[in-house]
Amino acid sequence: MSAGLAVRGDASARPSSLGGAPSTGSRRSSVGRVPNWFLIPALVFYAVVVLYPSVAGAYYAFTDWRGGTEANWTGLENFIALVGDSAAVASLVNTLTIAVTLTLVQTGLGLLLALALNAAIRGRNLMRTLFFAPMMVPPVIIGLLWQYVYTPNGPLDSLLEIVGLGALSQSWLGNSQIALWSIIASVIWHHVGMSMVIYLAGLQSIPQELYEAAAIDRAGPLRRFWSVTRPLLGQSTTIAMALTMTSSLKLFDQVFVMTGGGPGVATETLSLIMYKEAFVYGEYGYGSAIALVLTMIVAAIVFLQMSITRRGEVEA
Amino acid sequence: MRLRTRRRATAALTVAAITALGLAACGDPGAGDADATEGEVGGTMNLATTSDRGLAPLIESFEADTGAKIEGTFAEAGALNEQLRIQITSGTAPDLFRSSPGYSSPSSVLNLQAEGNLMDLSDQPWAEFVPESFNSLQQADGGTYAFPTYGQAMLAFYNTTLFADLGIEVPTTWSEFIEACETLKDAGKVPISLGLADSYIAQFTPLALAATLVDGLEPDFYDRLEAGETSFVESEGWREVLEKTFGLIEDGYTTPSPLGMPGDPAMQQVGNGEAGMVIMPSAASPVLAGMMAGGEDEMGNFAVPATDDASETYVAFSPDYLVVNAKAKNPATALAFLEYIAEPENISSIAAATGSIPALSNAEPIDNALNNTVQPFLDEGRTAPFANHAWPGGKVAEALITTSQQVVEGSKTIDDVLAALDAAYQESLS
């Protein structure tokens, strides 16, 4: 593993530190290398704070551990209970709905914003800052802010009233048909700046010559986007979608603050029921089982998604 | 520029695993036992509770008197419960810490007692002053395992200016209560402010009514429930509690669309006179007082009646506890500190500072609106613990919250709520 840390370049061409003679092959192999045992402190730290908790968490998923009492091995009992748990099933459906919607809508909006703000328009830097600014606010604050926005007769209802759409006023967080979508809208508002920045970076890495060549070939704006921009943004799309997918599959803060999973179980997510089972009810074994299932789901979906999106990547 | 997809996929999988499995291993399971009553008062004693409000001057004077040092950690109740559960499991819990009543959370008194994590405080001099109604929340195997720092009651808090302007007398019966709601509604006000977007608030009205309709009129219900002789579905008291709770919403006596209204704006409606009253625990009353133009003086309160016989009314009244760690490193100082704050003037000063009710019967009376309402009920023995504090585990309360929201929304019925309570109760017992 130390090879990656070795000084790159043609070492044989450099003079020895002790004289002007070129280095021999055996000396080349040690110059600039970091001994493997230098990795030990980092590996020990990683094992203690990451590997051990992860493996122990996986173990507890197969037990009935409730915190203070002895942990008894229960095999697949927690997972069988999970399948029959209506709240867990509802939360899985909600989690997948959130993940798919956020990934598609947030990534799409991020791309549109990036395209708009990559053009030579006045005040684009200010607009980029404004769209990215919500990312700097903690999710809990965002949740509280939007909970207020959605209050009956609150800012959103007032705005609708002003623009003549008062009939659309809703109990935004109190109607189980709408509450999940209300939360999704707030998350998009919070995170769309991140997708925008990823796409902006991608757009700025596309060589201008390609657009010039396309213009010579009389390609219009749509054609240039489809044949030049879109394929060359493949890597950005992969990154933006992977980050959005992973963060949305484990969405917790906004749901916890805005609805607590309600009304009923209308906005429950896997992260939320994992938290409730483990830290509110003390069912650490069952909570760990939910965590393990969430891990598998995140891993499988991200792997699948990256397998698909990488097909669209091309080199500039 | 082609991305190293495989490497990224591996990294993504690693991140996913770390994210979800971070729940893990907070320490090895198991609890020990310790004879921790030995030692001299002095040294450093660790304390963890929700706030030093009311305690700070007592800590200062105790430290000055004894030379002991009290290291306090203060956090919001939910966060503290979670933190303590982990500390107890890993053997790093403080000497003296706050604990919830009964079985209401994984780190509540009777759950910790069952695991052998708490010191038996039966022989402490203040134990004889613990109200009998608290027994089911802190006693087990013949021992007393918690010190009631102060008490809170589930009451209706109202805007006195609005009540006076509309000529509303404080109701003492259910009919008078409905009459007051009708007067407020006719005046274009929201009679009862209700913010169910904060889901826990769904418990408040049922808990207030259950003190009378279940604890008062069906006093053996919970004993029979525990013995498997009855159920929530069979309880006339619980059915009436829910019928009256949801009836208030159906009849338009609460905030419109309460499921979309958060708790704080709901309270503000009472503060600014848009709503007449709110049913909530007294511990939240200082927040409401801060929302009123006239402050505490403009805020009145009354016991929520549930029948047409005022003498049948019970008040839901539960304590907030401090407990001593069975493995305390400085048990002598922890016990001495409890004995110090149990002195009548000290226990009253805590209650006065926290806007609560003294929870020991020898406390000096406090002359304020809250205590003037609750004290007669305490004197007559007409108080009962919050029902959720006596339930085995938090899932019964969660069932009440979840299905209540669904009833308000129209997707469930009262029968569904009662069945859900039974199912959660049985699950918690298993």
Image (spheres, grey):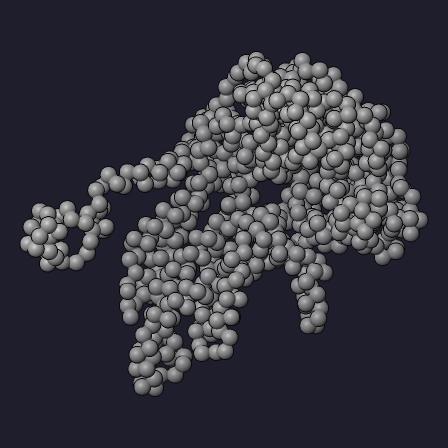
Residue at position x 89%, y 41% in the image: B170
Q: Quadrant of the C terminus of chain B?
A: top right
How many circles with numbers are drawn on the protein?
Answer: 0
- Which residue appears at 35% of the width and 38% of the height? A45
Give the residue at x 32% y 36%.
Answer: A44
Q: Residue B264 vs residue B423: left or right? A: right
Q: Nearer the viewer, residue B140 or B56?
A: B56
* Viewer can see residue A9: yes
Q: Name the quadrant containing residue B235.
A: top right
Say if residue A255 shows up in the picture.
no
Q: Nearer the viewer, residue B229 or B219?
A: B219
Q: In the image shown, does B385 or A23 lie closer to the viewer? A: A23
Residue B225: image x %, image y %?
69, 26
In the image, residue A202 sits, relative to residue A51, either above or below, namely: below
Q: Is residue A277 left or right of residue B3?
A: right
A174 displayed left or right of A267: right
Residue A39: x and y in percent read 27, 41
Q: Position of residue A114 (x, y in %)?
A: 45, 70
Relative image position of residue A256 (x, y in whole percent) = 58, 47
- Tell me the quadrant of the picture where the N terminus of chain B can be found: bottom left
**Which residue is drawn at the image coordinates 44% and 33% (left, top)?**
B25
- Residue, far right: B167
In-image side of B173 versus B220 (left or right): right
Q: Is residue B397 above or below residue B189?
A: above
